[in-house]
């Protein structure tokens, strides 16, 4: 039997019990409604969708509990965004991507930010952002920087988009912070990064709990490789930082080895890590990191500074 494609339902009408089919229908209805809301927000931006009561916890009992009709200010429920755990980065995902960074329309992602007026560009990227926990904690710490999550899985990206939409609505009247500087796009960071970001545009790139691809023959699918590091060095500015964290020791060693071997990166010290607020956030904020914490696993951190290009040195 062929593998289901990205986003394809993992069910079969003949073999699936009725209760499961009902759950699938509910999920579908919920997702269709949310898709319409997303479209509405994009078209109407910067005006957000109509108000409704809110809850800030993912696990809180929603006002529409049991119903598949989303309440637009409610934080999204993960169970409606179920998807396969892994996505093959070498597949043809039929992704939308700009031909160059200058043709990218960021206004739908950061509708409340006057981008052209201030010549604002994304500065911080969370690569493989998963459910978006890192950005949600980084956002208020860097209110003047645009932060972008890039995620390959369709429904996970939609979950983050809906989460941000709800947070913006919830904090609409907040005089201090409104989640306007965080956004997400569906993208394959292993293929199209220079289509989104200019040379030296980014100051920080996060690689939090990347897929380990355990088997040796799968190592080429790892998100840190020599070739990809040259792309990351291209989009990172001099002095910019690559942050990595994983619970897989072998992957940690792999990432450190490749980064140490690359001429444009230099490892930052443990003292530096201890003083950097992003390391602390990265250690605690991501969903994967929290799962590791619950399972009492270990976390390995390594941070690397982008060095100047040799031609820029004396
Ligand atoms: C193990 S999860 C970690 C998620 C998140 N960083 C965290 O710590 O909770 C790895 C994530 O990377 C995403 N991913 C894998 N390869 C990717 C790629 N080439 N481009 C963008 N995202 C990717 C996966 O879909 C998945 O959501």
Image (cartoon, rainbow, N blue to C red):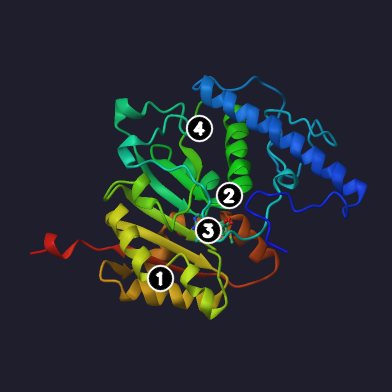
Q: CA distance from mark 2 to mark 3?
A: 26 Å
Residue 289: percent from the left, percent from the top?
60, 61
- Is residue 188 visible in the rendered image? The answer is yes
Element type at mark 4? loop
Would you say the residues marked 2 and 3 are in contact, meaning their CB atoms lie under 8 Å apart? no
Number of the label disc, if any, that sits on residue 136: none
Which residue in the rendered view is the most extreme toward the left? 314
Which mark sits nearer the N-terminus, 3 or 1? 3
Residue identified by numbered label 1: 270
Number of the label disc, if any, that sits on residue 133: 2
Residue identified by numbered label 3: 91
Number of the label disc, if any, that sits on residue 177: 4
Q: Is mark 4 within 8 Å of ligand 1?
A: no
User: In which quadrant of this rendering is ligand 1 seen?
Assistant: bottom right
- The residue located at (74%, 35%) in the rendering is 30
Which mark sits nearer the N-terminus, 2 or 3? 3
- Is residue 171 visible in the rendered image? The answer is no
Would you say the residues marked 3 and 1 are in contact, meaning their CB atoms lie under 8 Å apart? no
Q: Is mark 2 within 8 Å of ligand 1?
A: yes
Mark 1 closeness class: few <14, some 14–19, many ≥20 residues within 10 Å: few
Q: CA distance from mark 1 to mark 4?
A: 31 Å
Instruction: State whether residue 5 is above or below residue 111.
Output: below
Mark 2 closeness class: few <14, some 14–19, many ≥20 residues within 10 Å: many
- The residue located at (42%, 43%) in the rendering is 97
Residue 133: percent from the left, percent from the top?
58, 49
Residue 162 lies left or right of residue 176; in this view the side is right
Mark 3 closeness class: few <14, some 14–19, many ≥20 residues within 10 Å: few
Would you say the residues marked 4 and 2 are in contact, meaning their CB atoms lie under 8 Å apart? no
Q: Is mark 3 within 8 Å of ligand 1?
A: no
């Amino acid at each position: 039997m062929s593998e289901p494609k990205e986003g394809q339902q993992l069910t079969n009408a003949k073999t699936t019990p009725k209760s499961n089919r009902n759950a699938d229908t509910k999920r579908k209805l919920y997702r269709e409604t949310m898709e319409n809301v997303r479209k509405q927000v994009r078209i109407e931006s910067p005006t957000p969708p109509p108000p409704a009561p809110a809850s800030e916890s993912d696990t809180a009992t929603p006002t529409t509990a049991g119903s598949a009709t989303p309440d637009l200010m409610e934080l999204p429920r993960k169970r409606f965004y179920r998807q396969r755990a892994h996505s093959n980065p070498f597949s043809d995902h039929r992704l939308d991507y700009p031909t160059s960074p200058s043709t990218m329309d960021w206004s739908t992602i950061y509708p409340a930010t006057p981008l052209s007026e201030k010549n604002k560009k994304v500065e911080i990227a969370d690569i493989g952002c998963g459910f978006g926990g890192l950005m949600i904690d980084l956002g208020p710490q860097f209110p003047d920087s645009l932060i972008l999550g890039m995620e390959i899985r369709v429904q996970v990206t939609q979950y983050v988009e809906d989460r941000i939409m709800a947070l913006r609505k919830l904090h609409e009247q907040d005089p201090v912070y409104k989640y306007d500087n965080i956004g997400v796009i569906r993208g394959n960071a292993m293929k199209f990064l220079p289509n989104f970001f200019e040379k030296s545009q980014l100051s920080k790139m996060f690689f939090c709990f990347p897929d380990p691809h355990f088997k040796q023959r799968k190592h080429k699918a790892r998100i840190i490789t020599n070739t990809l590091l040259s792309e990351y060095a291209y989009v990172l500015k001099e002095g910019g930082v690559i942050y990595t964290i994983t619970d897989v020791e072998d992957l940690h060693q792999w990432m450190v080895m490749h980064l140490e071997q690359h001429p444009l990166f230099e490892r930052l010290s443990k003292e530096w890590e201890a003083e950097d607020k992003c390391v602390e956030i990265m250690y605690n904020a991501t969903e994967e990191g929290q799962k590791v914490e619950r399972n009492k696993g270990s976390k390995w951190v390594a941070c690397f500074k982008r060095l100047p290009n040799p031609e820029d040195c004396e």
